[in-house]
Amino acid sequence: MEFSGYFETHLTLDAPTPERVTEAARWAEGYGLKFTHIELDRGESPSQPMVTYHGKGTLDEELAVAERWTSRLAEAGFAVTRTKIEMPREATGVPASRGVAALLPESCYFETHVKLLLPPGTDLAALSTIVEPHRARLSRNARKVREDGFQERFVTQRCSRVGSREVLRFEGHLFRALETSGVTFEKRFGPQPRVLSVEREFVVHDTALSVDAGWMDAAPVRDAGEVPPYVDGPGSDRDRHPDTYLPNTSGPETAQEKVFDPALKHLDNAYRAGEPVFTDPGLGSRWWDANQRAMELALRAIAGTPWRENLMLRGSMLMPVWVGGAARRPRDLDFVVLPAETAPFGDPADRMFADVVDAVTSASGEGVSFDAEGVRLESIWTYERVPGRRVVVPWSAEGLPPGTVQIDVVFNESLPEPPVPVTVAGADVLAASAELSLAWKVLWLYTDMYMQGKDLYDAVLLAENARPSRELLVTVLRPELGAEAETVDEGRLRREQTHAGRPVPDGWEHFVGDCPWVEGGPGEWLDRFEAAMAPVFRQEGRG
């Protein structure tokens, strides 16, 4: 089969010492060639210094060019141990099906290179475990060290004996595995693990695949049954309910509606179970009392783990501390992981979740017990700057319908101020201050595509009880609003919603369904929001 078009050629060199690598880099620079020192995460030859150049024509012509460069390198004292020539997948001759690919030598194979940016301390062994089932391995450019402490890694996926159509399936499953582990494909800044680039090639010539022994072979697909089902890239597994969708009441005495949850918007069925409604008010009162006890038990259990210094409480469970009895009924435990650079996969994240689940399910008291076998987990905020996981732990109490405690944990949330120590339900925890809690509520109201009524309600109560500095507010808003954070005011929410032709907010109906005791419509609460926030926005410092 004739290959023609654009080519990229890599010549791997015998440069076994750091001094020889440096000499080879200088030689390449003198000839205007790209020099890279790839280090595999394992294998018989993990150190692979190489020069790279590009060409256009036929494969035979490119092989002749490679021979000339090989001779020049040999004259300079650098033996070429491998010649690897790649071309774009769209090029002439690249197989589209397994039948055509079967006619090619084993030295022809597909590669996908996913370049990742990872926070300091990322558990690379855990990342390797995530990608290996998808015919992928890790490597790095040893010559590139970032000053900010972050690290770049390549995830290389390899497949042979398949066509480009089948490769897309393998690739889609790799992307989904990365995404589920907390790696975002969005172009964002901040400490979250994210994809910097994706490169796709077809290797048309490889003289020494054995150089990768112990790391990866050509990864041949020997049977059609090995090809996974088609997925439409990142986020394609959308047509399911969240694993944590667990309506926690049953029977004729209760009703529980589905409620849209933006934390799950990577799924088509982005629902959580809404507030249960009881036909018997007495039963409902007893159930809610038991649910509160279950949440308090869970919080005390978590506060008793070694991770108490790494989990900062925020959200509804904290609201009574800052606003008193007007706070809405807590429905979950919200935590931010400290420090912000902690990766959402691998160690220590996996160990932390295991310890938290074990602590909660081992707790019991006040007539409430937890079901360890029924624990569910789900990724949340998959496409956002703060990915996380949701843990749902079922509880039971004699004479009552079952319930659940929902624990939401997010990573990579940068803190503009340190947490404050508070006592909640007898648990000593680190928490977001009232001022930071309000700043976050304003951020979500101003930037979330799916604004929630509960955020407006909470923001009003917080603003009427606490006043953050304008500096704190701008610091929280700036990563999302950019320069607009310096000039935005309390009227933005009303203007944005009016411009979009939507109610203010459009999630108010869901909110009052969950909190039917709330008096006043969204317009009244927006008026209160603007009145309470105006003094904050009008503090000195506006640019």
Image (tube, rainbow, N blue to C red):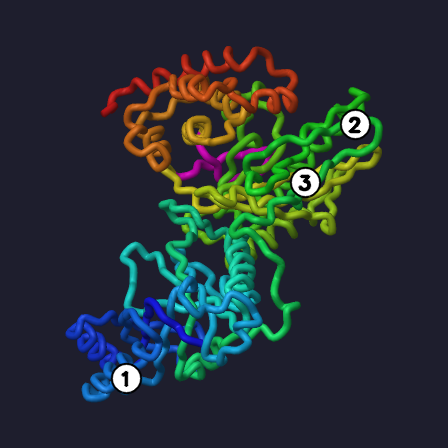
Of residues 481 and 149, the one drawn nearer to the viewer in this rendering: 481
Residue placed at 49% from the left, 42% from the top? 336
Q: Earlier in the sequence, mark 1 or mark 3?
A: 1
Label 3 vs label 2, nearer the camera: 3
**Residue at mark 3 to residue at mark 2: CA–CA distance:** 17 Å
Amino acid at pointer 2: Thr
The tag on residue 254 is 2
Q: Is residue 337 magenta?
A: no
Q: Mark 2–mark 1 contact, CB under 8 Å?
A: no
Q: Main secondary structure of the magenta part?
A: strand
Crowding at dot 2, Cα within 10 Å, few <14 / some 14-19 / many 20+, comes out as some
365 horizontally vs 331: left or right? right
Residue 397, by quadrant, is top right
Crowding at dot 1, Cα within 10 Å, few <14 / some 14-19 / many 20+, comes out as few
134 horizontally vs 413: left or right? right
Q: Position of residue 310 (x, y in %)?
A: 48, 47
